Image: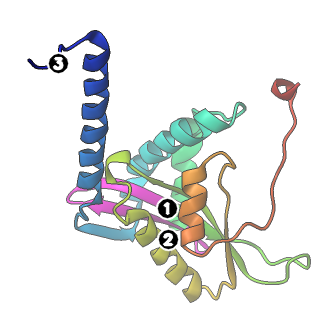
Amino acid sequence: MGRRLTPGRYAAALTVLEHLERWLRKGEKMARPKVRVREATEADVASVVELSSALFQEDGGQRDPWMNLDWPKQEGAAYYSGHISGEDSMCLLAEVGDRVVGFLTGYVRGWSNLRPIRLAELESMFVTEEYRGGGIGAQLVREFVEWCRGKRVEGISVTAYWANEGALRFYRRLGFEPRNVTLEWGEDAV
């Protein structure tokens, strides 16, 4: 006689199925779609604002209690338009078919006596969840590094939330190393 399906065994079976389903979805994500990375144009500003809004909600919304999560919708169009048209700034898009699935923005910093080298800042990067793990983020970073080489940049920095372990692992895999840590204090810390 077979085992009786008790509520506990039923819940355990569902948990196993959920894990299997997640694993299979992860496998789907790992299939590398044909991705096109290109520089954004003024016609792409709305897509950049949409992806930036998703980044703010996901990253800042979980990790920064003071983040204005509406900033991309309030000021993003003008801000990213400046990155797109600027000589020392840029915005890249990753496309799968006719769908924009990721973006990266960055710029060359001004030279200073404090750090007398030409530095660039990888300011923001986001890949939609269903396309993560397939190399799109690395492709965006590689294109940014090539752009920086053309600008005679000697170093690139990127900032990630300390609690965003996935982003920290990702950037370390690409050769970025921690240099400093910013600590904050505020009313919610008391």
Alpha-carbon span between mark 2 and mark 3: 53 Å
Q: Secondary structure at mark 1?
A: strand
Q: Nearer the viewer, mark 2 or mark 3?
A: 3
Q: Position of residue 119 (x, y in %)?
A: 72, 77
Pick the front one: 89 or 33: 33
What's the amino acid at mark 1? Leu
Q: Position of residue 114 (x, y in %)?
A: 91, 75
Q: Earlier in the sequence, mark 3 or mark 1?
A: 3
What's the amino acid at mark 3? Arg
Query: Are dots 2 and 3 in contact, CB under 8 Å?
Result: no
Q: Earlier in the sequence, mark 1 or mark 2?
A: 1
Structural crowding at the residue carrying mark 2, measured as other residues with C-alpha within 10 Å and reported as few (<14), some (14–19) or many (≥20): some
First to last magenta residue range: 86-103
Instruction: Name the residue beneath numbered marker 2.
Output: 141
Query: Are dots 1 and 2 in contact, CB under 8 Å?
Result: yes
- The question of residue 97 being in magenta is answered with yes
